[in-house]
Image (tube, helix red, strand yellow):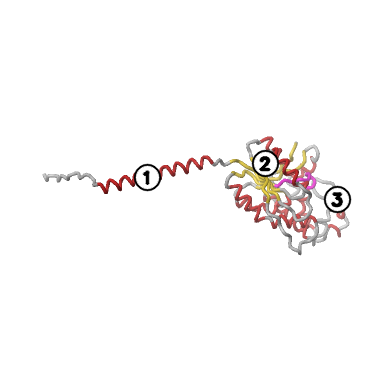
Amino acid sequence: MAKLSEKKFTAPGKDKIGKMDRWGRRASDCEKKEDSRKNNMQAVAIDDALVLFPSPAIGHFISMVELGKLILNFQPSLSIHILVISAPYDAGSTTSYIADVAATIPSIYFHHLPTITLPSTTGTHPETLIFEVLRLSNPHVHQALLSISRTHKINAFIMDFFCFASLSFASQLNIPGYFFYTSGAGSLATSMYFPTLHQNTTKSFKDLNTFIHMPGVPPIFSSDFSSAVSDRNNKAYEYFLDMAFCFPKSAGIIVNTFELLEARALKAISDGLCIPNSTTPLFTPLAH
């Protein structure tokens, strides 16, 4: 049987010991840095938040903020982030109202977006101006959502129906996108049915001279429609039509009404009569 060779153990020299010490110190430093990184990640808490995007018109703006207050009554752990647009026209001053809310409700934050300059070719119709301002503000809205999402988990993006052009950001960022309809259910029913009316005639409402029948509401004479939608050639008409097509794409609609007040309109919406060619989104009145 062959004899196994024996090898002598040789103690490492001073140079090797020095290298081993340096390697040990480096490993220890890396461990400390990793522990510090983990501690910093734990220190930055990801809070649950809602982002609310109101139209700049004072009535719409205050209604949206009050919705945020109402939500906090049921979910006080949330933070509410409100995107504020400064309209380049008189939309009513909300400065003192914002200051009061910010001072008294610390979990509501206001994010002021840059002011938009409207092109000289923009029409003068009030609704057209609102839609244009909101459309041109889209890059700032997107940036605000990205910024908030770095420090918060955005559970929902709730926007005024005038802000429909921002709905696509919700799906891009994997956030449920909801509409807040500041008017009542009767108005919502007519808005939802608007694409059907558009498809059923080639004339403008102002030229029909007849009663228009829609689910959930009494017949409305054609000349009594809002000036924003009475003329098919009006830019505002086009915007309202695009808005109506966006309703089924949302995660849901919150309606500023209650069931006893508008039972007929709410039932028509619930039964799917107002969007006959698509799926009616989840909707809820603010009170029952």
Q: Which mark is residue 271?
A: none
Q: Residues within 10 Å of mark 2 (few under 14, many from 20)?
A: many
In the image shown, does 147 or 175 lie closer to the viewer?
A: 147
**Amino acid type, mark 2:** Ile
Residue 259 in the image, given as x and y percentages of width and height: 77, 38
Quickly name the residue at label 1.
Answer: 27
- Please identify the quadrant where the N terminus is shown: top left
Residue 75 in the image, given as x and y percentages of width and height: 65, 36
Q: Earlier in the sequence, mark 1 or mark 2?
A: 1
- Please identify the quadrant where the C terminus is shown: top right
Q: Place residue 267 in its image quadrant.
A: top right
Q: Place residue 46 in its image quadrant.
A: top right
Range of residues picked out in magenta: 179-187
Tag 2 near tag 3, CB within 8 Å: no
**Amino acid type, mark 1:** Ala
Tag 1 near tag 2, CB within 8 Å: no
Query: What secondary structure is marked by label 1?
Result: helix
Which-is-in-front pick, marks 1 and 3?
1
Q: Which mark is residue 108?
A: 2
Image position of 171 (left or right of 133):
left
Number of numbered labels in the structure image: 3
Q: Earlier in the sequence, mark 2 or mark 3?
A: 2
Quickly name the residue at label 3.
Answer: 220
